[in-house]
């Protein structure tokens, strides 16, 4: 296989940046029309292809585990005699860290309480509704998330480390396209990956900033206006852009350390003061329900409108993030066997997520009952306040509330740091050391896109961004389905 690639060819960069500029320009000039158009596209996709989002994640699951348990599982992600770059402990730590993102902080309490108040089936506010809500959250943040990421990660690691191809999504299609991956078709694949990643990250930046601004208002009474949200986005953009430009490894390690220790600290604290026995009980039952109903809930469409709003939305959201999260887990897994990679990258982060969700969700339900529905009222009023409302019912709120804001910043900065690097790499022909200037451009671009939309359309503009990223995930989902066949075709040529 040829690894030649014209790194001076900036067509992917120019087209991707052009699409972003056009989107922003129309969103500023015609905000209501743009929002209407984006919502129309999303409605069409989720109504007519919602089944495909669910089915795709299920297909990815089957493909991955068939590969892991087959003879292909012994193949190295690298040369046959290559050793892993990191020790098992270091590798496990990074995979655990990868499981902790801004979505986990934002939704760990807000989502189960929301489903408790408005379940897809059955009566709200009942013990059954509570257990169903936790099972739904496990389904939304569990195995399927990491299966989606692992498909991209496996493709990137295999074709980069074993076949010597550029670290681009298009490289995964070499068995099908051959040298044409370096032509217009390959570039189109990379542009779609960049588009999905850019708007997926920009949306998360908006959600994270909204939660921070709301938290500041909840704690200190400083009103969370669009201007305040824009200031928060600007500060976060400076943090993760400076971290990326100054030196990826040191910056990522520093951010990861803050995130990991704060995450562990909050988990222990909430577990101790949120009702240990209650949390352990709900974790045990929810895990049993999740395992027992795994196939059924993976493909459940009994309430179409609810399915479109939650499971379909999440599957599309993770597909939009797959390119850059896949690159992260690929980068730390060089020298591992395919079996090691799949089992570890799916089950370790998923396990971390299950524990996190059980602690946060269980504590929220326990404290909500003790406070006669106070957390439900907070979520009804503003879903972004769920975490702070829960912490308010535990000791040391004056310490934990500001620390929660730092955790949100660290959680997003880590993801945005990686995404900025991956966007730079994808738009520089797969260069593993993209220029600081290019990294700076993508960091600023992500923040600027979000700030301009928020200032023009308020926090409702975040919904438009969110819609755009989900719509962008649709063609990338089709690309990932073909990617499964391409990976299998390449593996069949291996002598194992």
Image (cartoon, rainbow, N blue to C red):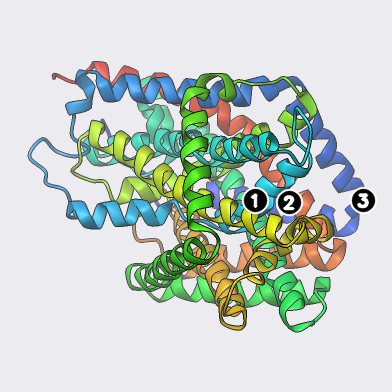
Image quadrant where residue 341 sits: top left
* Residue pointed to by mark 1: 199
Going from the N terminus, do you reach mark 2 or mark 3 first? 3
Q: Where residue 170 sits in the image (x, y, percent)?
A: 44, 35
Q: Residue 449 at x, y = what percent?
A: 70, 62
Which residue is found at the position 54% from the left and 39% from the top?
138
* Nearer-N-terminus badge (1/3): 3
Query: Dot 1: within a 10 Å radius of its alpha carbon, few (fewer than 14), some, or many (20 or more) residues?
Result: many
User: Which residue has dot 3 on it?
Assistant: 32
Q: Is residue 274 above or below residue 104?
A: below
Q: Looking at the picture, how far across and down is residue 89, in whole percent? A: 21, 55
Cα separation between marks 2 and 3 = 13 Å
| Residue drawn at 82 percent across, 71 percent down | 226
> Mark 2–mark 1 contact, CB under 8 Å?
yes
**Disc 3 on helix, strand or loop?**
helix
Residue at the disc numbered 2? 465
Q: Residues within 10 Å of mark 2 (few under 14, many from 20)?
A: many
Q: Which one is in front, 473 or 257?
A: 257
CA distance for labels 2 and 1: 6 Å
Determine the secondary structure under disc 1: helix
- How far is disc 1 from disc 3 in space, using C-alphas? 18 Å
Q: Note whether 344 is above or below 47 in the view shown.
A: below
For the point 55% across and 77% down, the residue is 403
Q: Is residue 325 left or right of residue 398?
A: left
Tell me the quadrant of the picture where the C terminus can be found. top left
Residue for point 56% across, 54% down = 104
Disc tally is 3
């Amino acid at each position: 296989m040829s690894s030649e690639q014209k790194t001076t060819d900036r067509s992917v960069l120019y087209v991707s940046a052009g699409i972003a500029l056009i989107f922003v320009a129309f969103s500023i000039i015609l905000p209501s029309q743009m929002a209407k158009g984006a919502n129309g596209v999303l409605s069409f996709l989720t109504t007519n292809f919602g089944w495909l989002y669910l089915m795709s994640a299920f297909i990815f699951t089957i493909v991955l585990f068939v590969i892991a348990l087959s003879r292909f599982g012994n193949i190295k992600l690298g040369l046959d005699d290559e050793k892993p770059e990191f020790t098992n402990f270091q590798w496990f730590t990074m995979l655990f860290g990868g499981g902790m993102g801004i979505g986990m902080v934002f939704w760990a309490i807000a989502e189960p309480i929301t489903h408790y108040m408005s379940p897809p089936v059955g009566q709200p506010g009942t013990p059954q509704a509570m257990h169903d809500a936790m099972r739904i959250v496990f389904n939304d943040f569990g195995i399927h998330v990491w299966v989606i990421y692992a498909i991209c990660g496996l493709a990137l690691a295999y074709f980069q480390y074993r076949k010597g191809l550029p670290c681009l999504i298009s490289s995964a299609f070499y068995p099908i396209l051959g040298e044409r991956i370096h032509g217009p078709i390959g570039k189109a694949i990379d542009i779609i990956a960049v588009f999905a990643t850019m708007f997926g990250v920009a949306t998360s930046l908006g959600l994270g900033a909204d939660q921070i601004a709301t938290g500041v208002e909840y704690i200190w009474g400083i009103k969370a206006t669009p201007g305040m949200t824009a200031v928060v986005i600007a500060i976060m953009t400076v943090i993760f852009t400076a971290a990326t430009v100054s030196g990826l490894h040191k910056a990522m390690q520093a951010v990861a350390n803050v995130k990991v220790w704060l995450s562990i600290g909050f988990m222990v604290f909430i577990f101790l003061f949120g009702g240990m026995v209650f949390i352990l009980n709900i974790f045990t039952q929810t895990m049993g329900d999740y395992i027992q109903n795994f196939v059924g809930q993976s493909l459940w469409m009994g309430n179409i409108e609810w399915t479109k709003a939650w499971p379909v939305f999440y599957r599309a959201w993770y597909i939009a993030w797959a390119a850059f999260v896949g690159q992260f887990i690929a980068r730390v897994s060089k020298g591992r066997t395919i079996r090691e990679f799949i089992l570890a990258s799916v089950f370790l982060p998923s396990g971390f997520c299950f524990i996190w969700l059980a602690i946060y969700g269980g504590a929220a339900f326990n404290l909500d009952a003790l406070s006669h529905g106070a957390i439900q009222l907070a979520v009804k009023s503003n879903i972004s306040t769920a975490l702070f409302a829960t912490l308010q019912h535990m000791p040391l709120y004056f310490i934990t509330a500001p620390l929660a804001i730092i955790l949100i910043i660290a959680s997003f900065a880590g993801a945005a740091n990686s995404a900025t690097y991956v966007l730079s790499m994808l738009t520089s022909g797969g260069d593993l050391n993209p220029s600081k200037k290019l990294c700076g451009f993508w960091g600023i671009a992500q923040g600027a896109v979000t700030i301009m939309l928020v200032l023009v359309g308020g926090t409702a503009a975040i919904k438009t961004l969110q819609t755009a990223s989900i719509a962008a995930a649709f063609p990338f989902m089709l690309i990932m389905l073909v990617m499964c066949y391409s990976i299998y075709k390449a593996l069949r040529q291996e002598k194992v």
